[in-house]
Image (tube, rainbow, N blue to C red):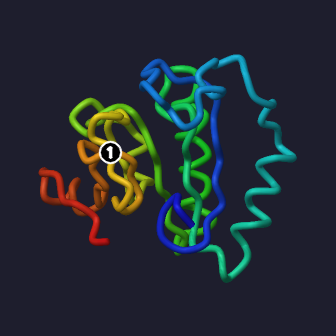
């Protein structure tokens, strides 16, 4: 429930080049780490998303936009949006919005939490993010307005 609104399926991917100081999940930095993602794991995600009480999926890591991940995560997001149009898709990345513009995956996301975690800007009471420099972005509205629109908390 800390990985977006509602009860969610969360997929943590391996591979991150940001290496934020005091990262909560440094074990995910190695793109060769983790477990293989096979058709069986994908079907397990789909079975969970079929449940009425599941709000959607969150991609986290590591970094879903790491070069080792972005193509596969984009394909999965595309398929999820097609099969489950009423489920929301959240993505956490160390990249900032301005670096993501033009990526296909933006077409499938509902919310993106962008920016590296910065320990000096850590605040315990922040909603859905770890440091105050990070933004919780309403992706469809930001794409429509061609400017960053923050997701309402």
Which residue lies at the image location 37% right of the left edge and 51% below the top edge? 112
Side (left or right) of 129 relative to 133: right
Res 117 → quadrant: top left
In the displayed structure, 144 sits above or below 131; it is: below
From the image, tell me which residue sits under label 1.
Answer: 131
Taking 132 as reference, is 55 above or below it?
below
Q: Position of residue 103 (x, y in %)?
A: 36, 35
Q: Quadrant of the N terminus?
A: bottom right
> Which residue: 52% across, 23% down?
16
Q: Quadrant of the C terminus?
A: bottom left
Q: Please tell me whether residue 148 is drawn above or below residue 16 in the rendered image.
A: below
Q: Residue at x 52, y 58 (%)?
A: 3
Quadrant of residue 133 within the rendered picture: top left
Q: Residue furthest right?
A: 40
Query: Quick one: SS at disc 1?
Result: loop
Answer with the quarter of the image where residue 24 lies: top right
Q: How far across and how far down the image is residue 151, in percent?
A: 28, 65
Relative to 128, does residue 32 appear above or below in the rendering? Answer: above
The structure residue drawn at horizontal position 34% and vertical position 59%, both measured from the top left corner, is 126
Provide residue 118's location: percent of width, then percent of height.
33, 34
């Amino acid at each position: 429930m800390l990985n977006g609104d509602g009860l969610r399926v969360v997929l943590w991917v391996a591979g991150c080049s940001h290496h934020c100081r005091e990262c909560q999940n440094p074990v995910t930095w190695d793109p060769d780490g983790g477990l293989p993602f096979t058709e069986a794991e994908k079907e397990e995600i789909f079975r969970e998303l079929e449940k009425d009480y599941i709000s959607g999926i969150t991609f986290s890591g590591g970094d879903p936009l790491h070069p080792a991940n972005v193509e596969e995560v984009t394909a999965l997001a595309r398929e999820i949006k097609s099969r489950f149009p009423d489920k929301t898709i959240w993505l956490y990345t160390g990249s900032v919005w301005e670096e993501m513009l033009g990526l296909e995956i933006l077409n499938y996301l509902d919310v993106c939490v962008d920016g590296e975690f910065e320990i000096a800007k850590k605040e315990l009471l922040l909603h859905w993010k770890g440091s105050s420099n990070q933004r919780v972005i309403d992706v469809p509205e930001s794409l429509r307005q061609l400017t960053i629109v923050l997701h309402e908390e």
